[in-house]
Amino acid sequence: MTAAHVVERAAADGPSAPRQPRGLGWLYVVGGLVGLAGSFALIVEKFEKLANPGYVPTCSISPIISCGSVMDSAQAAVLGFPNPLIGVAAFPVVVTTGVALLVGFRPPRWFWLGMQVGTTLAVGFIHWLVVQSLYEIGALCPYCMVVWAVTIPLFWYTTLHNLAAGNFGGGRSVGVALARFHSTVLVLWYLVIVVLILVRFWDYWSSLL
């Protein structure tokens, strides 16, 4: 059962018959592990670069695809420490939540609202980083983009679940309506980012043709 199917079924049931969001559980486990892997890889590369200033990260393969350029920027340590440490701390929480959902844990409303706050902050942060990478730093970090790619669905399906479950205090019909187009919204979301990347670095991409 997919995360979207869980959303639709949750909205169809009354509050006395909650359903286990198993699809969301799998998303949390898989997405959390992928995000953790991307964050951990970035931390390893960052430590290597700190230990050896001449080190060229494995994900720096061109002037545009360059983790090194991103790592050296002020935006790479917004809170005073490397941004990937946030992912290393946060993604295990996502994975643990996913495992708990799969084994039958039924989180209370406050827990889901906490997940909503966390994923909303995360998706806002990665979109700020998208803008910074494209228009300020002028380079793309592959490992960073892995984190971007998993954060978006984590936010999207958490939001759909909370809407359909009535965790925001309103009706569930909005969640059901959005769930019918869940994949369309997600594809368009990714597509917008891909188009922005293509347009911003078109001179480079066209030189490869």
Image: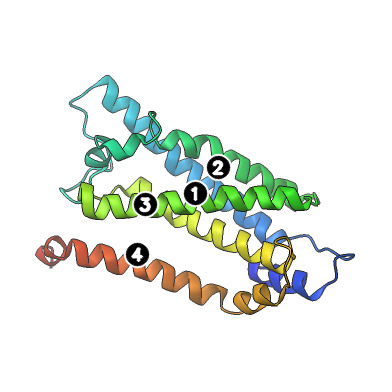
Pointer 4: what residue?
193
Of labels 1 and 3, earlier in sequence is 1
Residue 84, percent across and down? 42, 37
Q: Mark 4: which amino acid? A: Ile
Residue at coordinates 26% horizontally, 36% vertically from top-left?
Answer: 57
SS at mark 1? Answer: helix
Q: Is residue 87 left or right of residue 172?
A: left
Q: Given contact means CB atoms under 8 Å apart, are the residues at marks 4 and 3 in contact? A: no
Residue 60, percent across and down? 23, 43
Pointer 2: what residue?
91
Label for residue 128? 3
SS at mark 3? Answer: helix
Label for residue 136? none
Label for residue 122? 1
Q: Given contact means CB atoms under 8 Å apart, are the residues at marks 1 and 3 in contact? A: no
C-alpha distance separating marks 2 and 3: 19 Å
Of labels 4 and 3, earlier in sequence is 3
